[in-house]
Amino acid sequence: MPIKTFFILSFIFTLGISVQGEASFLDKARELLNNHERIWAVKYTVQSLDEAVSVSQKEWFPNLGITGTLGKEDRNNPNVTPDTDFTARELSLTLTQPLFDYGARNKRIDVARLGVSQAKQTLELTKQSLLLEAITAQIGIKTAYKNWEYAKLSVQNIKRQTQLEYAKVEKGAGFSTDVLQAKVQLAGAEARYIQAFGALKTARNRYKALFGDLPFDESSLSEIGLPSGSIPPTIESAINLALKNNLQLASLATGRGIAKKSIEQTKAEQFSPNIDLIAEQKYKSNLAGTQGYAKESNLRLQLSYNFNLGLSSLNNFNAAKSNFKTSDKQYYDAKKLVIESVSNGYDQYITQKSNAEALKSQASISKAFLELARKERKLGKRSLIDILSGETALINARSDASTARGQLLISAYNMLSAIGILTLDKVKVPR
């Protein structure tokens, strides 16, 4: 594709972006954390588990059983009692009030409540993950846009220099080799422009997938600042914070608690009887060979225990203990991984910070060199290749510095997320 056509298409692509008024990043992120599909999915899970708590609590409520029968009863009675042939009817009302179950129901309530706590931790973890995605998308599109602008400016500058050299050759004052050298540099600059525009399109796709629309002007997007005040001063303090606040670790700890409670629940359910108070009222008509209407009432305590002769109770109990061991090992494995993740994140942040400062300094030096080289070129002290090389070095340095700045910001917020303290109020957006 000719570079002119590519420039035109990129311009049209830019104009095709939504022209809606730009909301601030914080407003967009807040809307995302309230209404994104992932958030609602976990919220509905929390609601479902809340209902499960209510169900487990209401197991202590009495149960009413209603049984009605209607049928033909033909009875051959013994001895001198006449045989009967009646249409029999019976209505039985049974009220069962649980009294004692060795803690099985209370343990089920505890497990259900822990399930709600774990779901709420998952909700907060989802919010942190989504916020980190939003920050990364914002930084990504800003960085890609800056690099695209730098590449576009480089193409314009080298193209202008090429035209000047060509004009000199036309007047007999320049060299054809200089023009060819300028064209070589221009081709390289145009290639970088195409790559930068491709990266910008990718960043726009990520931004749109997350926020639902594209900004009309990337230059007007909020800058994300470095959360310096929220970053722990040492790796050790960062690790200690993570062990207290990391939500994935907290969720696994809760899962460990659920597994432990499940052992107690299984023990009570499998090895202990239930004691219930039962009130029963029966209304009978022509039943059991007795003609006419009868009513029967009784109130009793009932002890019940079901025991499987294959000792399946032991299997259930051992399975619960194995589940706890699984949760326990997963928790301690995750603990080591969190320590590793935070340590790597902190080291990466320090590295990116030094790298960003060095590349920023390089860009400043490259700019100063190019400005001086252009002045010396006019005085005949510099060759064209010096100017073109300086132009290329400047654009590369600016792009590298911009990219390094973006990587520094992302590494900082990644670390806050790994620690478990990434919230919207910690996102620095300059006013």
Image: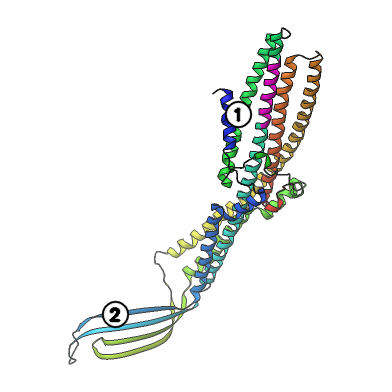
**As drawn, 12 above or below 240:** above
Mark 2: secondary structure: strand
Q: Nearer the viewer, residue 141 or 324?
A: 141
Observer-nearest of 79 and 66: 66
Label 1: few (<14), some (14–19) or many (≥20) C-alpha neighbours in 10 Å: some
Residue 357 seen? yes
Residue for point 52% across, 70% down: 54
* Circle 2 residues within 10 Å: few <14, some 14–19, many ≥20: few
Quarter of the image where the N terminus is located = top right
Q: Does label 1 or label 2 sit earlier along the sequence?
A: 2
Residue 178 vs 407, above or below: the answer is above
Q: Position of residue 14 (x, y in %)?
A: 59, 36
The spot of residue 189 in percent (x, y) is 65, 23
Which residue is denoted by mark 1 in the rendering? 195
Q: Which mark is residue 69?
A: 2
Left or right of 290: which side holds 206?
right
